């Protein structure tokens, strides 16, 4: 999976403008939140702006192109949804690597030596467990669960 393919899928989950008072991210457009990007005028963010930000701040940061194809989108999506460090921690725990939140050569080796489909299942299971523990689960849980189901189907 390429970044462009991943971005297209991501926009199915993150597209449009939302300002839900229950969302800790606050005002968002194309999934980019005012909380994470206080300098952005969220009202004026374009799809092209979002694509550049997602590639720079998430795809490259989690080294998605270096991951097995079955796992690329899940890790990228988790980084977007929960932050790069958290996505890397879930990846490390799934691969049996030291969970320090740093995606380096040891983690990449552990990932390469693991079954990518088992990793995808473990990774998304950890995400689901995390989501069910959030105070906003009642409000957003159905959408998060559907998002993870889509990730598992795509793997």
Image (cartoon, rainbow, N blue to C red):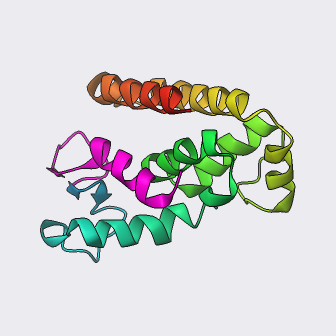
Left or right of 149? Residue 104 is right
Residue in view at x 34 percent, y 31 percent: 136
Q: Where is residue 7 in the image (x, y as percent from the top left)?
A: 39, 55
Residue in view at x 63 percent, y 26 percent: 121
Left or right of 54? Residue 152 is right
Q: Front-most of 109 and 5?
A: 5
Asked where in the image residue 29 lies, by quadrant, the reply is: bottom left
Q: In which quarter of the image is the C terminus?
A: top right
Residue in view at x 42 percent, y 29 percent: 150
123 is within the stretch colored magenta:
no
**143 lies above or below 62:** above
Asked where in the image residue 103 lies, by quadrant, the reply is: bottom right
Asked where in the image residue 23 lies, by quadrant, the reply is: top left
Residue in view at x 86 percent, y 41 percent: 113
Number of callouts: 0
Left or right of 14? Residue 109 is right
Q: Position of residue 13 (x, y in %)?
A: 30, 41
Q: Give the range drawn in magenta.
A: 1-27
Q: Front-most of 69 and 35?
A: 69
Q: Front-most of 67 and 143?
A: 67
16 is within the stretch colored magenta:
yes
Q: Where is residue 58 in the image (x, y as percent from the top left)?
A: 50, 62
**71 lies above or below 43:** above
């Amino acid at each position: 999976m390429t970044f462009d393919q991943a971005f297209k899928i991501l926009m199915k989950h993150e597209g449009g403008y939302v300002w839900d008072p229950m969302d800790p991210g606050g005002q968002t457009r194309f999934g980019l939140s005012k909380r994470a990007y206080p300098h952005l005028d969220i009202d004026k963010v374009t799809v092209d702006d979002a694509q550049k930000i997602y590639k720079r701040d998430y795809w490259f940061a989690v080294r998605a192109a270096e991951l097995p194809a079955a796992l690329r989108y899940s890790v990228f999506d988790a980084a977007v949804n929960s932050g790069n460090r958290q996505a890397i921690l879930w990846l490390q725990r799934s691969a049996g690597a030291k969970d320090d939140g740093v995606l380096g050569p040891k983690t990449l080796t552990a990932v390469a030596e693991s079954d990518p489909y088992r990793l995808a299942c473990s990774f998304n299971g950890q995400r689901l467990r995390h989501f069910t523990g959030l105070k906003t689960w009642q409000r957003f849980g159905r959408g998060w669960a559907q998002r993870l189901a889509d990730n598992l189907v795509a793997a």
